[in-house]
Amino acid sequence: MGNPLPRMIRRTGSFLVFLFFARAALPLRSHWPDREWKSARRGEGTVDKVMQEMGKTVFMTERVRVGQLILGPFETNAYVLVCLKTRCSLLVDAPGEPERILSALSGTFPQGILMTHSHSDHVGALARLRLERRLPVAAHPEDASALPVPADSLLHDGDRIPCGALEIGVLHTPGHTPGSLCFHMEGLLFSGDTLFPGGPGRTGSPEDFRRILESLRTRIFPLPDDVRVFPGHGEGTVLSRERVLFQAFCARGYSPALCGDVVWEETP
Ligand SMILES: [Fe+2]
C-alpha cells in the first residue's frame, strides 16, 4: 500500500477546481442585495417577485444591472444603475411613486439622482428622495433652476460620474429643454426625452428643433452602432436603427417651420 498523501492532494485539488467553476457559473446571484435574497430564500417571496420590486431588468452583465421603473401618470421611465462589484447605485430621473423607487434602491448604496431634464413628469419623487435618503441631485445648470429642489451638483458636457467601479459620461443635448442631458455608460445611453424610437423628443419651436437635431448629430450619433438606447418614456431601441432613420430624414429635407412631435419616417 503506497503513501495515500499524493492521492489526497489530487482529490482535494480536483474538488477546489470544481468549486471554482461552480462559483464562476453563478457569478451574479451573490452580487444581489442580501436582504432581498434572504427573504426570497425564507419563502417570503419568489425571486421573480424580488426582481419585480427592484424594477424590470432591461440590461445586465457581471458589472452592471439596469432596472427600469415606469412611474407616474405619464408612464415615465426611471432607471436604477447598479455596480454589481460594489452595490453602488445611481437613479436616472425621479418621476414619482417614491416608495417604488426606494424599494428598487434597497440593498444598494445610492450615490445620487441624475436628472435628464426638469419637466414635471420626471421630477415628482425628487423632493422626498432628497429629504428622506439625502440623495444628492445632479442636473445641467440650464435646467437646474426649474427643478422642485435645489441641485446639489451641476453637470456639464464631458463630465464623468463615478459609481463604484462604473463611470457614467455626461452629454449635453439641448433642444427638448435647454439643459437636457443624456448619460452614456458601457454601451448604454439614457436619452431622457432627447431621443425615442423613431424620432426626437418634442420641441417647442423650429429653433429648438434645429437645436435637438444638432445635439443628435454631434453628441449622440457619433456613439457606436450597438449602443442600446433607454429613453424617458416607452421601450428602448438601438442606435444603429435610429441612425438610419435620422439620416434618411435629413437627406429628404424638412420645412424650416417644423417642430413639435416629429417622427422621422412620417415627416414629408
Ligand atoms: Fe420632457
Image: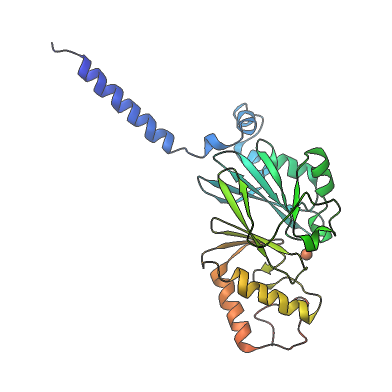
102 displayed left or right of 251: right
Q: Which quarter of the image is occupied by the N terminus? A: top left
Q: Is residue 118 visible?
A: no
Compare residues 115 and 258 and report the one nearer the observer.
115
Question: Residue lying furthest top in this view?
Answer: 1
Residue found at the very far left of the displayed protein: 1
Residue 21 lies, with reference to residue 121, above or below; the image says above
Name the residue at 69% across, 77% down: 263
Quarter of the image with the C terminus is bottom right
On the question of residue 189 being in view, the answer is yes
Position in image of residue 232 (x %, y %): 71, 61
Tell me if residue 16 comes above or below residue 261 in the rendering.
Answer: above
Q: Is residue 216 above or below residue 28?
A: below
In this rendered view, identify the residue nearer to me: 171 or 242.
171
Examine the rendered structure and indicate whether residue 219 appears above or below residue 144. below
Q: Position of residue 242 (x, y in %)?
A: 59, 72
Q: Quadrant of residue 89?
A: top right
217 relative to 174 in the view: left or right: left
